Image (cartoon, helix red, strand yellow):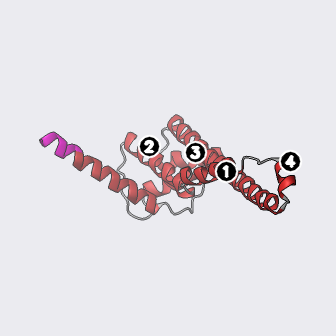
Amino acid sequence: MTREQQIRAAMKELDGSGRAEIEQALTLIAEERTSYERAEKTKSALNKIASAMHRAQQALERLPPPTREEIGNPPFEHYKAAAIQRKASEKRSRDHTKLIAAREAQCLLLKFGYPDNTTRLDRWYRLAAVLYGDRKANLSWQCRKLKKERKRARSSKLSFLTI
């Protein structure tokens, strides 16, 4: 879907209102998708560097000691540590982008006074799929997760107010 097709489809789900808000939501989702793709490329590059440095270290260890001392010891551990640290910090998936799309759809629905029902093929699912960029995408898990989070937040706010 093109961006304009997404906007039109989303406006249809919102009964013709909210173009500016939809564009803002699409921009946020696009930034998230770009961030994810950039992180994947960086992680892949660091893994390749760490692998190459490991092979270089193994080759260096097979050299005679005088030659090894002449070449010196490159900072293998630095690259290995960077790759491991990157793996630990980048533990999100494409589902994260779907979650952002579902959250933006929920915000739009609530802003324009629509219920955020989580029945299959309801307005929220359809709008979230359109914002994600694939009308056939299944975002039911993400919508249910957000619904549970919202319910949990409401109950904790109420318990906080009664104390």
| Residue 70 - label | 4
Please provide percent x and percent y for residue 115.
35, 50
Q: Are marks 3 and 1 in contact (CB under 8 Å)?
A: no
Label 3 to label 4: alpha-carbon separation: 47 Å
Q: Comparing marks 3 and 1, which lies closer to the viewer?
A: 1
Q: Are marks 4 and 2 in contact (CB under 8 Å)?
A: no
Residue beneath disc 2: 108
Q: Main secondary structure of the magenta part?
A: helix
Label 2 to label 3: alpha-carbon separation: 18 Å
SS state under label 4: helix
Query: Which residue shows up at 52% across the image and 45% down it?
Result: 11
> Of label 2 and label 3, which has the lower sequence position?
3
Kindly identify the amino acid type of the residue bearing the numbered disc 4: Glu
Kindly identify the amino acid type of the residue bearing the numbered disc 2: Leu
Q: Is residue 80 above or below residue 137?
A: above
Q: Comparing marks 2 and 3, which lies closer to the viewer?
A: 3
Residue closest to the eye, 22 or 145? 145
Label 1 to label 2: alpha-carbon separation: 48 Å
Residue beneath disc 1: 77
| Residue 32 - label | 3
Is residue 125 toward the left or the right of residue 147 in the image?
Answer: right
